Image: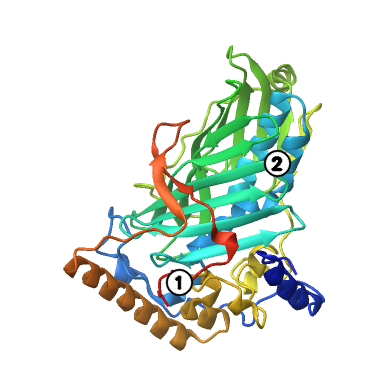
């Protein structure tokens, strides 16, 4: 079993007893995903062109059975890259592996066209992976605007990875554009290095008609605040004929702005690193055709997904940094989940007594959808949303403000921007003052 819980000695013993009863981790969901062909999203979105969608209630049929808090925990699917970075002695070598980790963090979005459930205010999610050497806690710290804060720490005090996400969604007629506002912070404790970056833009095409498909685009700048090294990654837009679909290209430069490595590949497949001279020589030999006009998410005329083969041409002398993990053969029937994602809502008998009462696994609407009961899922979703609205009205009438439980707002010392920071104590397993949100 991949999902473990920990705490004081007595709790650990109870968990070990639970784990001993399990032979293998989850490999599928209790029920296959339903068809969305009978539902029209146009009736909901036709008045929302150019607007932000965070306040618009969507039918449960367009969701996937995970909370957004669980979805962002998928950043940790390729934690082995962080461990590798911790083991390297050269700062440029560490930077290129951190760059691969930053790309891998968005790879699970490939073909994931279902919308995760919006977290309720105060909702939490914990994930402990002893096999990968980390534990994770996240909390929905704000509802308007919706902000999700997370903190992951190495069980051997090798690294910390934290940040907060404020997703802004806009509808442009045939596509939805997602801007994942928020900063990722990776602290390699052994090397006393701190890296920061933001995620690229994401666009889901053919919301109304046609086959849904996803592209990521925009510039991602990874900064090593300790050495001055920088990595600039360009997630390329699809382009008019699809030649740049899913491509990522960039470079690493040191504090004197000298290019040290070139990074290239596809966020849906693999990422390589090569010496700049080898890269330039290869490009000269291959020719440099004029760049094609590129599309953007807004105001596009055609949304057809380009028919391109998912392969990366490897430049001689390149080093493989990361390759995507193959998905289960039946992934299309389970919301295109990865093998990692399919385990995230796992709830074994007895586990609910060990989790915080605000944990996503205890949400009845998500659980009902996972079990294939869409009528119950819809009813529970509406009940929880109304309960949240009623609680907000009550606080307003009594002039009370919401207090977060596990995170506190502060200033990021590396970026100077406001951010949310874990205050500790979650894994002490004292949940007596957790709010009743379900």
At which x and y percent is residue 134?
A: 68, 53
Q: How many marks?
A: 2
Whether 122 is drawn above or below 362: the answer is above
Mark 1 nearby-residue class (10 Å; few <14, some 14–19, many ≥20): some
- Marks 2 and 1, Cα distance to the nearest angstrom? 39 Å
Whether 220 is drawn above or below 161: the answer is above
Quadrant assignment, res 95: top right
| Secondary element type, mark 2 | loop
Closer to us: 69 or 180? 69
Q: Which residue is mark 2?
A: 158
- Determine the residue positioned at 75% across, 70% down: 1
Q: Which residue is mark 1?
A: 62
Closer to us: 9 or 419? 9
| Secondary element type, mark 1 | helix
Left/right of residue 215 with respect to residue 43 in the rendered view: right
In terms of sequence position, does the residue under pointer 2 or pointer 1 come before the other? 1
Q: Could you tell me if residue 435 is visible in this image?
A: yes
At which x and y percent is residue 270?
A: 71, 43
């Amino acid at each position: 079993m991949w999902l473990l819980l920990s705490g004081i000695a007595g709790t650990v013993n109870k968990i070990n007893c639970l784990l001993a009863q399990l032979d293998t981790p989850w490999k599928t969901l209790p029920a296959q995903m339903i068809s969305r062909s009978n539902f029209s999203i146009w009736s909901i979105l036709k008045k929302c062109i150019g607007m932000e969608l965070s306040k618009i209630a969507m039918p449960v049929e367009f969701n996937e059975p995970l909370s957004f808090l669980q979805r962002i925990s998928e950043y940790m699917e390729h934690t082995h890259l962080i461990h590798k970075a911790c083991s390297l002695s050269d700062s440029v070598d560490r930077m290129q592996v951190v760059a691969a980790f930053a790309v891998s963090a968005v790879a699970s979005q490939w073909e994931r066209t279902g919308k995760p459930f919006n977290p309720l205010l105060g909702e939490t999610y914990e994930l402990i992976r002893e096999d990968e050497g980390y534990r994770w806690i996240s909390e929905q710290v704000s509802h308007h605007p919706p902000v999700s804060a997370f903190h992951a720490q190495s069980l051997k005090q090798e690294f910390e990875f934290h940040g907060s996400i404020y997703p802004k969604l806009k509808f442009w007629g045939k596509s939805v554009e997602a801007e994942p506002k928020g900063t990722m912070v990776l602290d390699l404790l052994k090397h006393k290095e701190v890296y920061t970056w933001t995620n690229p833009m994401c666009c889901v095409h053919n919301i109304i008609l046609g086959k849904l498909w996803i592209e990521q685009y925009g510039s991602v700048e990874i900064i090593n605040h300790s050495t001055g090294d920088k990595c600039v990654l360009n997630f390329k837009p699809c382009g008019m004929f699809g030649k740049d679909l899913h491509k990522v290209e960039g470079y690493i430069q040191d504090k004197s702005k000298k290019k040290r490595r070139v990074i290239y590949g596809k966020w849906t497949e693999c990422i390589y690193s090569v010496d700049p001279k080898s890269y330039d020589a290869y490009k000269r030999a291959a020719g440099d055709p004029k760049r094609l006009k590129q599309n953007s998410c807004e105001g596009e005329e055609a949304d057809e997904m380009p028919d391109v083969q998912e392969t990366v041409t490897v430049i001689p002398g390149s080093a493989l940094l990361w390759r995507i993990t193959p998905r289960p053969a039946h992934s299309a029937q389970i919301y295109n989940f990865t093998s990692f994602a399919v385990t995230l809502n796992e709830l074994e008998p007895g586990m609910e007594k060990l989790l915080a009462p605000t944990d996503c696994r205890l949400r009845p609407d998500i659980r009902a959808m996972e079990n294939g009961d869409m009528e119950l899922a819809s009813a529970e979703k509406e009940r929880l949303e109304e309960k949240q609205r009623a609680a907000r009205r009550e606080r307003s009438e009594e002039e009370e403000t919401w207090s977060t439980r596990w995170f506190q707002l502060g200033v990021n010392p590396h970026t100077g921007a406001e951010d949310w920071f874990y205050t500790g104590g979650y894994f002490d397993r004292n949940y007596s003052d957790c709010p009743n949100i379900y």
